[in-house]
Image (tube, grey):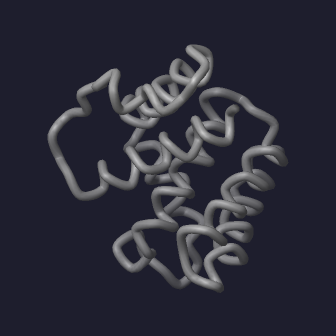
Amino acid sequence: MRTEARELAFKLIFERLFVKENYTFDEEFFAVLKKEEDRNFAKDLILKFEANRSEIEGVVNSKLIGYSLDRVYKVDLALLYLAVTEIKYIQTPFQIVINEVVNFSKQFSTEKSSRFINGVLSAIVKDQND
């Protein structure tokens, strides 16, 4: 299921915010995903994030009113990066991505994170559609 693949990609992006070495794709790590299609989707998300990280950071940073990247909770930042990667580079409909990421924020982050993430992503999508 894509939700599980997204969650796995989110966890790897979160880890990447702390570890500077390149990813190694350990097949055991991806084995939790039953379908090969889901494993490939998670890997694609990670590779596209890595390849476009500077641009993704810039997109998120441009919509942080009154914040800077270093002030945003790392969990929230990883979720924002995941969403921007998927919307911009995989071109999944933004409604699906925002819904999934907001749900993840309710599970993995603070009580206020879902509204914050929704607001930032809505501003990014609005900008992209103008």
Across and down, in percent, residue 52 comes to 43, 34
Q: Nearer the viewer, residue 24 or 79?
A: 24
- Front-most of residues 36 and 70: 36
- Location of residue 70 in the rendering, given as x and y in whole percent from the top left corner: 34, 73
Q: Quadrant of the N terminus?
A: top right
The reply to whether residue 124 is in sight is yes
Quadrant hosting residue 41: top right
Compared with residue 126, is residue 64 higher up or lower down, i.e. above or below? Answer: below
The residue at the point 54 percent across, 74 percent down is 109
Q: Is residue 74 above or below residue 20?
A: below
Classify residue 18 by image quadrant: bottom left
Q: Residue at x 30, y 24 (%)?
A: 25
Determine whether 84 is above or below 31 in the image.
Answer: below
The answer to whether 116 appears left or right of 49 in the picture is right
The one nearer the camera, 4 or 16, is 4
Let me know if residue 130 appears in the view: no
Q: Would you say 32 lies left or right of 91 here?
A: left
The extreme left residue here reads 21
Look at 46% across and 25% down and name the residue there.
43
Q: Residue at x 57, y 24 (%)?
A: 34
Question: Would residue 48 appear left or right of 25 to someone viewing this image?
Answer: right
Total count of labels: 0
**Quarter location, residue 50:** top left
Residue 106, given in percent of the width and then of the height, sits at: 66, 71
From the top left corner, tell me how far across and down residue 85 is, in percent.
56, 39
